[in-house]
Amino acid sequence: MTGILLLGAAGQVGREITALAAARGVELAGLDHTALDICDPVAVARALEGHRPEVVINAAAFTGVDKAESEPATAARVNAFAPGLIAERCARYRIPMVHISTDYVFSGAKPTAYVEGDPVEPLGVYGRTKAAGEAAVRAAWDQHVILRTSWVFGAHGHNFLKTVLRLAGERERLTIVADQKGSPTATRDLAEALLKVAEAAARGDARFGTYHFAGRGTTTWHGFASEIVRRAARHTGRTPQVAAITTADYPTPARRPMNSELASHLFERTFGYAAAPWQERVAEVVDQLLADAGTASARPTAMEAT
């Protein structure tokens, strides 16, 4: 019998959860896309039967926001169909489920931080498929926690922080959008939050429903990038210019919310955990990526997405 069954174990959040669980002595089995097709009803049922977990965490998703515009069927299958399927199978075996969602279910038109009860109004395919996934989970199984988060970054996988580090090592000038705001969320904090929920669910005292969890504090993509570059300069000595541009200056296939700020007060009151200020986590991740490898070797290796 397994304590936690983690789906999407190879992603940036999945890898962080796996490492944290190991450090804490939490029993966890992780499956990535090579071990489990989350869109296959038979495979999902076999995974649950084989592991018999106390709780399932679904960290698997199609996260390519722009790519979703050109591959809507694939995005819908992974982000909408699969979560509903997993929830149905969890209901069959009476296993609580934790599912990760996103700020992109909102339009970004609200001037203040989004709370859990605000209406969803996604702007693009990615947001629409994630919203549909939330609805499918709710319809299939009442013993669920949906955790919306935003602007995720960490030492693993592909993310904004690692991209900025790479570009800061290659260029003298970076142009970054400055009119979209949000709350950067470290995978370390998100993993802590997910384990808090999973452990409560396994004990039988989780308060099920939808919650927001994001890093403490709000900034723009430009402010986020500026902090990354400032911290990296301690290791590299490089200080490329970080120039502010508008969303209109940087057109993308998918529209982005102008305001992605999520209010996390309900989660903190319910589960007793709050994220650290995002600047602190940026410092930790940058230091990890650069200092551990050494300044000279970090630029060609540690900055690359894994």
Image (cartoon, helix red, strand yellow):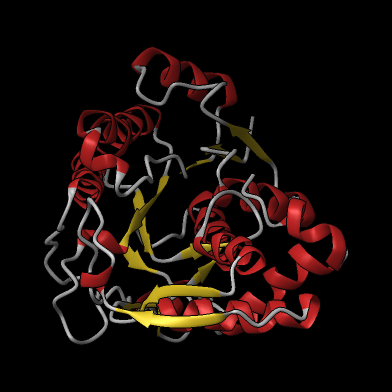
- Residue 249, percent across and down? 25, 71
Identify the image quadrant of the C terminus.
top right
Residue at (48, 62) in percent of width and height:
152
> What residue lies at 50% left-to-right and 62% top-to-bottom?
160
Which quarter of the figure has residue 85?
top left
Q: Is residue 172 left or right of residue 126?
A: right
Choose between 299 and 182: the one closer to the eye.
299
Instruction: Find residue 260 and report its image quarter.
Output: bottom left
In this view of the protein, can residue 36 be seen by the observer?
A: yes
Tag count in the figure? 0
Is residue 293 visible in the rendered image? The answer is no
Q: Is residue 170 left or right of residue 271?
A: right
Q: Nearer the viewer, residue 111 or 97?
A: 111
Q: Would you place residue 111 above or below residue 254 in this image? A: below
Residue with the most extreme front position = 172
Instruction: Determine whether 169 is above or below 273 in the image.
Output: above
Residue drawn at (38%, 46%) of the image: 63
Residue 159 position, x and y percent, is: 52, 57
Rendered residue at 57%/83% (across/down): 227
Q: What percent of the width, then of the height, locates residue 117? A: 17, 71
Quadrant assignment, res 45: top left
Pinpoint residue 111: horizontal percent, then vertical percent: 18, 86
Q: Quadrant of the N terminus?
A: top right
Q: Is residue 16 above or below residue 175?
A: above
